[in-house]
Amino acid sequence: MQNFFNMDYILFIAAIVVIIIGLIGDIIPGIPGTPVSYLALLLLHWTDRISYSAEFLVVMGLICAVITVLDYVVPVWGTKKFGGTKAGTRGSTIGMIVGILVLPMLGIVLGPFGILGILGGPFVGAYIGEKMGGTPDDKAWRSAFGSFIGFLTGTLMKVVYTLVIGFYVIRDVIAALV
């Protein structure tokens, strides 16, 4: 029974739980999924049985930082790429901020509609911004669609990163236990 409480086993379990939380955070804004996923690598690195090179940890940390920054930039880029104006870009940014800061709290009250609000924040924000800027409906919808595509692209980047980290975590934990 003493081996079960070995610190390595606790860190193995914690790393797996952290990967699951990171994956949830990649999909549901409010939890910083990418940095949480990176924490799983650090947890394993602190064990006696698994060690990563400094270069690997630095590269994965830099990728984590870049993806975290891009997650905020890509919806705005998508709005511009699909013909959005400055008003649409501002609206997308405001919608994203409202979606990240306000709507998770409403998710407690509104259930799944809170999540839909988070996913649609940049989309609705871009559309409203374009309409307030005097953009015709067809161009406003196109700008909003670009914002949503940017949001999905950011989410995909985060999920792929977490799945790669998850691969390393599962592989290395299994190897350490065998």
Image (cartoon, rainbow, N blue to C red):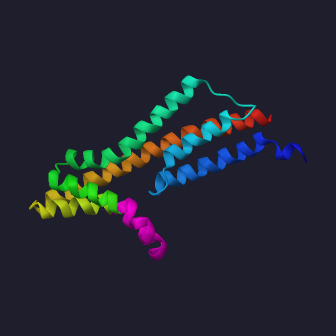
Q: Residue at x 89, y 45 (%)?
A: 2
User: 60 or 135, which is in the foreground?
Assistant: 60
| Residue 42 found in image quarter | top right
Instruction: Say left or right for 85 vs 67.
Output: left
Instruction: Say left or right for 80 vs 115.
Output: left
Residue 40 is situated, as x and y percent measured from the top left of the image, at 61, 41
User: 121 or 31, which is in the foreground?
Assistant: 31
Locate the C terminus by quadrant. Answer: top right
75 magenta-colored? no
Task: Tell me where the magenta segment starts and ends, as one range.
Answer: 99-120
* Residue closest to the far right: 1
Instruction: Say left or right for 131 vs 118.
Output: left
Q: Residue at x 75, y 31 (%)?
A: 49
Residue 36 is situated, as x and y percent measured from the top left of the image, at 54, 46
Please determine whether, in this image, residue 108 is positioned above or below residue 34: below
Q: Main secondary structure of the magenta part?
A: helix
Instruction: Say left or right for 12 vs 135.
Output: right
Residue 108 is situated, as x and y percent measured from the top left of the image, at 49, 72
User: 52 or 127, which is in the foreground?
Assistant: 52
Q: Residue at x 56, y 26 (%)?
A: 56
Q: Residue at x 13, y 64 (%)?
A: 132
Please determine whether, in this image, residue 54 is positioned above or below residue 46: above
Residue 76 is situated, as x and y percent measured from the top left of the image, at 26, 48
Q: How many marks?
A: 0
109 magenta-colored? yes
